[in-house]
Image: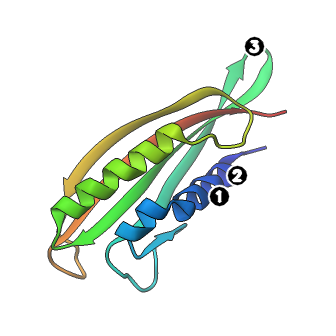
Amino acid sequence: MTGIMEVKNAVVKRLREDATLMQKVQAVFDRDPEVRVFPYVVVADLESANLPAHGMWAEAVTGKIEIYTKQNKDRAIEVMGIVQTLVHQFEFGLEAFENINSRVTLVSIEDAREKDVFKAVVEFRIIIQEV
């Protein structure tokens, strides 16, 4: 059994419920949007792996939260900081036995569809245990 969707849904819900974040972005998506409205956030690329945990089932879920801004690298950096804080402080409501470990990178990119698009990425990992 995988907890990947539970983690993804919890992350998306937490980001959408944060008033500070939602003042800085137009939307939070759970997949790449068909219509892009800058700036926006996408919870993407989740993967899971089973882990041995003292004879019990456990799963490591890792993922990326991508922030896209147009012609505003500073906004990408600002939103990245907000998202990182939310991920670190968030109680997922799952039976986690290890705190979230997140690694943050900022990469400026030129999107093939539009120029001057900046992308920031917050990577996270959470260990969950089946009850």
**Under tag 2, what secondary structure?**
helix
Checking the image for residue 9, the label placed there is 1
Residue 6 numbered tag: 2
Apparent side of residue 55 relative to residue 119 in the rendered image (left or right): right
Q: Is residue 40 in view from this perspective?
A: yes
Note whether 102 is above or below 43 in the view shown.
above
The residue that mark 3 highlights is 54
Work out which residue is located at the far bottom of the displayed protein and give it: 35
The C terminus, quarter of image: top right
Q: CA distance from mark 2 to mark 3?
A: 23 Å
Dividing the picture into quarters, in which one does residue 42 lie? bottom left
Task: Give residue 71's quadrant in the image.
Answer: bottom left
Q: Left or right: 114 with respect to 66?
A: left
Q: Residue at x 26, y 70 (%)?
A: 69
Task: Tell me if I can see residue 42 in this picture.
Answer: no
- Crowding at dot 2, Cα within 10 Å, few <14 / some 14-19 / many 20+, comes out as few
